[in-house]
Image (cartoon, coloured by chain):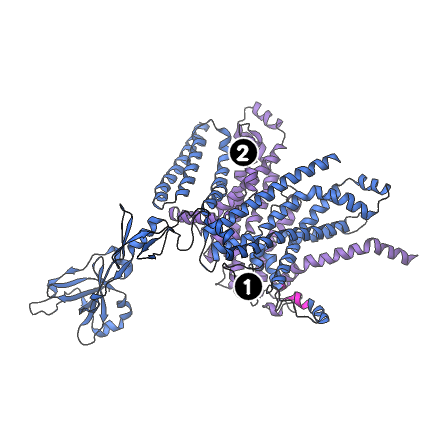
Amino acid sequence: MYMKVSMIIRYVLLGIFNALMFYIVPLAISYESWFLLLIVGIITFLINITYLTNRLKPLKWITPGFIFLLAFVVFPAGFNFYVSFTNWQTGHILTKTQVIERLEDLTFSTEEQRGVEFDLYVMQDSDLDYYFLADLDKNNLLFGKAITSDEFNNVNYANHEPSFKDSNNNIVIPESLYLLSGKEQIANSSQLQDLSLLVDKNTRINLYNISVFGASSGRIFSSQQKYSYDDDTDILYDNTQNVACTLGDRGNFICGGESVDPGWRITVGSENYQRIIDDERFRGPLNTVATWTFQFAFFSVVLAFFVGLFLAVTLNNEKVRFQKVYRSIYIIPYAIPGFISILVFRGLLNPDFGLVNDWLDPIYQLLNIEPIRWFRTEASSKAAVLLVNTWLGFPYMFLIVTGALQSIPTELIEASKVDGATPRQSFWRITFPLLLVSISPLLIGAFAYNFNNFTLIFLLTGGGPPLVGADVSVGYTDILISFTYNLAVSGGRGVQFGLAAAVTTIIFFLVLIISAISFRYSKRLERIYGNI
Amino acid sequence: METSKLTKWIREYGWRHLVGIFFVVFSMYPILYVITNSFADFANLQNSKLIPDALTFKHYRSLYEDSLVPYFRWLFNTYKIASIAGLFNVLLGTLAGYAFARLKFRGRRVGLITLVLIQMFPAFLAFVAIYLLFFQISDVAPFMGLGTHFGLICVYLGGSIGFNSWLIKGFMDTIPTSLDEAAKVDGANDSQIFFRIVAPLARPIIVVLFVITFIGIYSDYILAAVFLKDPNLYTVALGINVVFMDDFSNEWGSIAAASVIAATPIAVLFLFFQKQITGGLTAGSIKG
């Protein structure tokens, strides 16, 4: 009985899941989200083979977590790689089908009908909805509800209503409607301006001129579809110029020599990578950013490490009292969320009102120099970034170095003393190398972490100060990941997903190299350590 | 005699305390500064100093009363997102960890290695693809598209589940198998062994990993920034940094109060679990 209940629950859940997936599939197809369709397909398959059969027992435990890893880590990495080979950017966001739909919705007005004016009567019914009666000519007395452009799609067109005129050609309106006078029309003019009477899909009548004495006048506005597309021949016709448009090779239609916006996204091969390598205006800034990324990650680790090491060695002595107090205080910077500490440092280092410049004031006076304009010059921004990162990072280094120091066998130090080594010699020749052996994987980990330390850079300096003359929005303290973020999210010249994805792919490979080095290095060091 | 002893002490240990105290000041100054400023009578950065002349609660009150800045909403959003994502993270991670630790199957080693390799790449690196993917999901399934907490939680879930499974597996390896075997003899099946024996014994690591994941998500900036556009749905990291930045110097009092409220619970949580978090098991991988 117990088994049966659990089986029923399992199949019900599986049914709900499959129903949801089958609901998504047609939608994904209609939006041409092929990659999404792929991931939905894989997940559905995986879940079904896991829970429909009883053979793959371990998968029952692994699949639930694995699908999230697959969908939101593995899959985006692959998708990112694909995007890096496309021209997905502002002006090329949509698929071709979506572009054609959008182009076919565009209309244009022809000039010649503009001049025609005729009498227009404005009425209201008991619900206060507006109606227009347009006296075009003898044969056309058009009547209908006046609507705003939002309602164009779901309302009937105007009808010819000869019954609104008596035999003397005077306008007679039914009891149910109220005819607005010119003054009343003026009072409601802002509302009336937005209303039109639809004649057919491309023609509408608007109130043109309100008259207080006679009847107001209306005009016909006719619009035509600007582009029409022929599915079979894959040709777009431009109805304004009466020309057939050709397909451009960048994912655009070209009409009469000009490319039409919007275009659609297409694969462009290695173009984005070529731009990174060849385009002088892009390569220059990228080089600056890449160099600084390595410098930043390296110096961040080195500074934090040596501060931590210095502190650990200084305090790591049995006869130094209050060690526990010191330790519990040093860990506090590490416990504060990074985005908060960075915010506080922005206040402290503020060039105009910050406390740091207040303290340094005596030094400025003594040396007779200008106060440092934190965040406004390249050097001061870089110094600020490294200073803050040292503050953020030294507690961790202090902790791991202290731990490593305590695990180094004391006999080794004692032995070196017996052999006549000075404390300095025994530190640099024995303790320090052993220390490096045990913590170098952690140092490489810290390097990799800082290599992509987006939060620090983005929140402290925003990448600034800006690098002038660059083709893309970039600053002197931007690292690769924050540079990519600007390209993809908040660049001044539109978003460039394809290019950003190409830069991300390069970062992927750099991280891969760093990790590979870390693996080999830690293995080699383990061997050395094992021999001692 | 006495003086030479004192000089000797200073030379041996005194300087160590000098260095120690210097770094106490270095590490505590910014923290004390933001705490005192959050209670200070001045509101802008221009007048700020470490010790204010008078103490008030007005900055905290203004955070509560200012209807334009939904600060406590951000706080609630952040706790909601981080705890749901953290909870499912350890739940699904524990299930997978159990399979890798206890069940024998082909591809187990390969699976484990793949897990570790995948997690070497920070999930946020592919933020362009994540953005475009969820842009498409918005069309198909709007309830988890861009700008929703649900979608963001899914991304956070994927981001650390492999790593957590790996660590939980490692911990479960240290639980003696003789316990399960005894239970098996008594007729227990896999899920009974999991729920009754292995999972309860793995509780220490599960709790620590929940805390680490929670803190990591709480401190995340980039994914939240890519995902959330509606200020009412912001997380606290995003809210503080986007909304207050326009008028940084004049909003200083509110920024300080907001910082203290956002940081205190996390700092307490961190210090409480400090030994386990820094115990080497997650070296270098947390802190966002």
Specify start and end residues of the magenta stretch as a single range. Answer: A348-359
Judging from the image, mark 2 belongs to the subunit labelled: B
Q: Is residue B267 left or right of residue A64?
A: right
Could you tell which of marks 1 and 2 lies nearer the N-terminus?
Answer: 1
Is the residue at mark 1 from the same chain as the one at mark 2?
yes
Q: Is residue A224 visible?
A: yes
Tell me which amino acid carries mark 2.
Gly
Q: Residue at x 54, y 33 (%)?
A: B111
- The image position of residue B219, as x and y in percent, is 56, 52
Colour purple maps to chain = B
Q: Which mark is on residue B61?
A: 1
Colour blue maps to chain = A
- The image position of residue A179, as x and y in percent, is 18, 69
Q: Residue at x 47, y 55 (%)?
A: A489
Tell me which amino acid carries mark 1.
Arg
Quick one: which residue is furthest to the right in this view?
B1
